[in-house]
Structure formats: structure tokens, C-alpha cells
Amino acid sequence: MTDIEIPYENERGRRYRFFEILPGAISYSLFILPIALSFINVTAVVFFIVAYILIYFTRSVAVDFRALAGYRVMRQHMKLDWAELTAEVEAGKSDIESHPAWHYNNLKRLKESGVVIKPSQVTHAIIVATYNESREVLVPTIQTILDSDYDLKNVIFVLAYEERGGALVEEQSNELITEFGGNFKAAMAYKHPKGMKGELIGKGANITYAARQLQKYLEAENIDPAQVIVTSLDADNRPHKKYLSALTYLYCVAPDPIRASYQPLAMYTNNIWDAPAPMRVIATGNNFFYIVLTQRPHLERNFSAHAQSMRALIDMDFWSVRTVVEDGHQFWRSYFYYDGDYRVYPLSIPIYQDAVLAHGYLKTLKAQFIQLRRWTYGASDIAYIANQGFFKKNKAPKGDVVAKFFRTLEGHVTWATGASLITFAAFIPALISPKSFAANELPLLISRIQTIGLVGALASLYVSLKTLPPRPARYKRHRSIFMLLQWVYLPITTIAYGSFAAIYSQTRLIFKRYPSKFDLTEKAVIAEEQPDQVLPQA
């Protein structure tokens, strides 16, 4: 088997450490560069800042257009009768002229090449990972699965819980299986033992253990793992009712369904009306970002809830148990296992998730930063990509590896530096060289560029408002006005959370301060009968 594991801390040599340090080193250099150049050559720093902001501005405009296109596709796909489309894939023909052109193209291609896996052969396995979430969090997740417009007798439900969660979590997990399990083809709860050797405490180890137990079940039932699609969900993930049927369609029309992941839309709207304003801004910004990614499939990576063939999971020994970012890392793990012959197919069907909401305002602010520092720790994959792609024997196309490496590096560096440079860099030359005409004109020029950029920001505002769920009856109409006014927080949240979290994670990598466990984001729910009462997760 191809060695695709992340090396343990004591196995990371100088070369690996160089690439761990690289993103942080570049980020800090970009912060220092405007200051250093201001002492050396003011004109040079002005050109640098203007060029940087123009590139940033151009990309932002492109993002706005893609967001509108992505939102339109999402709305169209949520209205489609995926069960009917899937039935036509099974039959190999369609007599309905109103279906999308891409559907007929898929049917034509399948007729020529043959169907790899028929829809009637597909079994879904849904693994829900839980640590100490309460029934108030888990039951709505299970209920949304039950509400799917898909035959649940083709669905295996797995509740993956942690021994370290305690006896009450074990009791609750078994009760949920007893209560809801009869609706599925099969249902089981698997307890991940604590203290397993070589594992980092986190979701990756939990769902990997559950998937290994699931493999034993499939073998006992003689179910072909190539015909099983595994979706991993967090405790608060609620799939749209058409998710399973749309995923079935996509899996069955994919040219090579084994060598692919299937990425639904992460939409942080479950409790968006309950979350504090800064958290709402971050959540809707995340929604916007993932809608944009559906229009750029070459940049898609696994994130949060995602699906993959059980055959592929078995081949690569499931998810990594050595990282806190098992979702995003799973793409690279799969990519190098299959020597670059691997892709992520975007699925424009939402899986609704919770915005950050803890028990108390200050705790919520802290929990949001904890969540983002975990996400930004994906910068650790840069060293992994370099190590696997450049220094280990593999057949992945070198040009593709290089392109993916630099895109990933640029993405994390921009995450750490972009917002701060856009906000503050234009003022640095004038502070250091107050008599320079160019330095004093720079803030005015940048402000005009940013003013034009605000027009484009209307697209993000439109998409964000359109993706909001209906306002709960417990809130009055003026709550909707706050949904507009909240955007004054955008510069603050982008820097205080996005930029600071990214530079925090990159700094930890520089100094070998590796996380020892998955930082769980505290979740709370609002009691319907007592709107002012926030129920903690456990």
C-alpha cells in the first residue's frame, strides 16, 4: 500500500520542517515588507501595495460573479427531481425534454461507456460523529435524514461516539439507535475507545474506528464496498432532503466513482437567527465562500461533511488519525494514494450546519476563534503535499502537484495576510515618509479602489440574505434589520478571526506547537418555549 500517512512529530526532518515553517515565514515577510521598503524606496512600496490590492480587487470581482452563478445553480438543483433523474440513469434513457442538458449528456456518455454502478445497487452509509452533544443537537440531525426523499431501506445509519464522552453519552447513543434505527436498512452505534495508540484525539480517529466496524458488517452481509457511499457528518449537520438522491445520481454518472469525493454545500444557517452578530457575519461569509467553490471544481477540497466510496476508504485505511483537519487532509490523502488520478465533485445541495453559539456571549466569541484556528491549521497540509509530491515516489503529474502546492500555499498566506494588508498597508509609507507625495496619495487611491469594491460586495450581501432560513416566530421583524446592519462587523471579523486565526496556526507550525487534540466547538441551542434560554450541548 502507498505510504500516505502524516509522519509523527519525531519523524519530521529538516526538509519537512522547512515546509511547515514556509507559510508562516512568507506571511510574516509580507507584513514586514511594506515597513522595510518604506525605509528603502517609497516608490517601490507604493507600487507593491497598489499591485497587491489591485490583484485582490480583481479576484474579489470574479468571486462576486461566481457567487451569483453558484447561488443560481444551487436554487436550480434544489428544485430538481433527482429521484426521477436517477431512475432515468437506471433505465439508460429519458423521454422528458425539460430536463437539463447536462443530464442528457450524462446519459449519452453512459450509453457509450457503460454504467459503472447502477442506482439500484447503491447503499448509503451515514456516519454521524458525536462526542458530548445533547439530544437537542442530535435528534434534528437524525430527523432530517429520515425526511429525505430517498428509500431509507438503502441507508445504513452509524452513530460514532467516544468512550471519553462518558456513560451518559453511551446510554444516549444506544437509546437513539433503538428509537430511530428501525427506519434504516441497518443502524448501529460504535464506541471509539479512548487512548488508542498512535491516534490524535479527534473526529478522524472516531469516524475511522466506526468505518472499520462498518467494514466488518458489510463483509458479513456480502455488500460490495464499491457500491457503498459513505457520508461523514458532524452532530449538527442536517442534509437537505434531496441530498441522498442527488448524491446517488452524481455517484452513478461519475466516470470513475471510486476515485472521487463528493462535496455538498456547507451552509451555516441552522441557528443563524440565534447567533450573535459577529458570528452571523462569519457564518454567512463561509456560506458565500462555499457557494463560490462550486463554480471552481478544480479548487474543491473535502470540507466538513463529505462523501466517498467505501471501497476507496478501505483502500487508503479510511481517514487520518493523526491530524485535527481530517476532512481537508482527506483530499490529499486520496490524491496521492491514487497518484493524482483523483477529484472532488461539487454537489450544489446544502448540508445545513450550526453557526457558532455557546452558552454565553464571551464564550461564543472564544468558541468562534477556536473553530477558525482549527480550520486554518490546514496550513499543515503544505508540508505534507511537498513531502508526498516532491520527495516520495509517486506517479502524480508533477505539473499538477506543483500547481496544487502553490495554490494551497497562496491560499493560506492570503488567509493570514490579505485582510490586514488591505486595511492597513496603505498608511505605512506615509507614516514613515510623511513628505513623500506618493506615500500621501496612496491612502486616497486605495480608498477609491475599495469604494468600487463595495459595489461588488452587494452581490455577497444579496446571496447571504437569500440563503437565510425563514425568521423564527420567536423573533420580531426588527431582527431582519439587524441582519443588514451586522455587516459593519465585516472588517473586524475578517481580521480578528480570519487573519489572526490563520497567523496563529502558522506561528504554531513555526515553533512546532502541534495540537494534541481536536478542539471541539461548543454548540448550544435556543429553547423554543423559552427564547432567552440557551441550552448547552451536554
Image: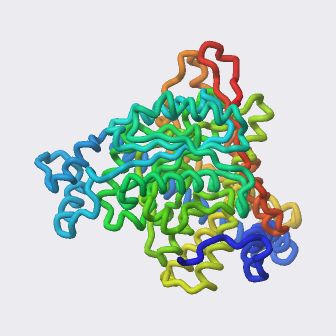
Q: Is residue 532 above or below residue 240?
A: above
Which residue, as the protein is rendered here, is positioned at the far left? Answer: 95
Where does residue 400 sit, x and y in percent of width and height? 50, 78
Where does residue 35 sit, x and y in percent of width and height? 84, 68
Compared across the picture, whether 414 is left or right of 463 comes to right
Where does residue 532 sit, x and y in percent of width and height? 69, 17
Give the quadrant of residue 377. bottom right
Q: Residue at x 64, y 39 (%)?
A: 281
Compared across the picture, whether 83 is left or right of 512 comes to left
**Residue 423 visible to the viewer:** no
Question: Which sits in the foreground, 477 or 385?
Answer: 385
Q: Is residue 166 above or below residue 375?
A: above
Q: Residue at x 36, y 63 (%)?
A: 257
Q: Is residue 399 above or below residue 239?
A: below
Which residue, as the protein is rendered here, is positioned at the far top? Answer: 529
Which residue, as the protein is rendered here, is positioned at the far front? Answer: 220
Compared across the picture, whether 482 is left or right of 400 comes to right
Q: Is residue 220 above or below residue 170?
A: below
Q: Quadrant for the C terminus, please.
A: top right
Question: Which sits in the foreground, 12 or 289?
Answer: 12
Where does residue 348 sit, x and y in percent of width and height? 41, 48
Give the quadrant of residue 20. bottom right
- Specify the color scheme: rainbow
Compared across the picture, whether 319 is left or right of 97 comes to right
Q: Residue at x 59, y 54 (%)?
A: 209
